[in-house]
Image (spheres, grey):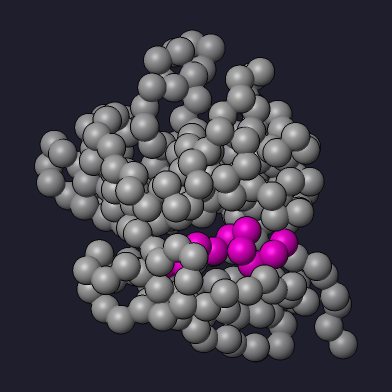
Amino acid sequence: MLKTKTFFPLQTWLSPLCVLLVLTLFPGCTVVKTTYDVVAGTVKGTYKLIKGVYTLTSETAKVTYQIGKFTFEVVQAPFDWPLTHDEIETIDGLPVKEAIRQGRVKWAPYVVKGRRYVPMSVRKAQRYEEKGVASWYGEETRRQKGGHMTANGEAFNPMALTAAHKYLPLPINVRVTNLENGRSIVVRVNDRGPFPSTNNPNSGKRIIDLSYGAARRLGFHKKGLARVHVKVIPVQVGT
């Protein structure tokens, strides 16, 4: 007999961006395959759209999808895991984990150290691109026991191709190009940051905080910072 557990709405984790989505529930070996719409010409391939909110009953839920040659594995974090950014005070006026539980994260305003941040809508984000400085985070979590939860409730994997952004809706996929060496990858934005730190207030001026794994793929994990171009992979909004 399966033990029943209520998970966050699937829309909390997913943005309609993928070529092929495989939803696997354990135990039980249930697999659901579907596809998502991406605007033609942004990524090679054929894309279709699915909509809906799902409640899963299982001990573990994992979603795997692909954009071009990049594969993304999305795992819901256990609710008792600490946040990667515990400086986030509220999301949409609620305690952070309550906002995550209710699925009220995507473009909801949030507060960090008394400052209110207002993310852009999904529609506005379709036109987003920016050049600036990228940093990376996550190496420290590899040496810690247990795991960490991102700002939208996902399990943070420092080796995965993910990123944190202060203003993009969560989750969303972007292409990041290292302007210093020309390397380019697609990452899943599923966290908030980077924020000004006490020791370095200018760190908040960086436009994106990449995972350690993404920084390695872009070739700047040893130096810490790189000048990058970030561009959202557009989706078909309102379909």
Q: Residue 69 location in percent, x, y?
A: 28, 70
The span shown in magenta is 8-17
Q: How many labels, in total?
A: 0
Q: Residue 130 location in percent, x, y?
A: 28, 37
- Please report the residue visible at 26 percent of the width from the left and 78 percent of the height from the top: 45
> Where 135 falls versus 31 (above or below)?
above
Q: Residue furthest left?
A: 181
> Residue 205 appears in which quarter of the rendering?
top left
Does 133 sit left or right of 58 as displayed? left
Q: Residue furthest front?
A: 238
- Residue 20 in view (yes/no): no
Q: Residue 221 location in percent, x, y?
A: 30, 38
> Where 52 falls versus 207 (above or below)?
below
> Residue 141 appears in which quarter of the rendering?
top right
Does the stretch in magenta take in 12?
Answer: yes
Does 112 sit left or right of 14 as displayed? right
Q: Residue 140 location in percent, x, y?
A: 51, 36
- Please report the residue visible at 25 percent of the width from the left and 64 percent of the height from the top: 42
- Please report the residue visible at 59 percent of the width from the left and 87 percent of the height from the top: 31
- Please report the residue visible at 69 percent of the width from the left and 50 percent of the height from the top: 104
Image quarter hosting the N terminus: bottom right
Does the stretch in magenta take in 208?
Answer: no
Does 83 sit left or right of 229 as displayed? right
Does 197 sit left or right of 59 as displayed? left
Q: Which of 25 and 104 is in front in this view?
A: 104
Q: Magenta stretch mostly in which secondary structure?
A: loop
- Residue 198 in view (yes/no): yes
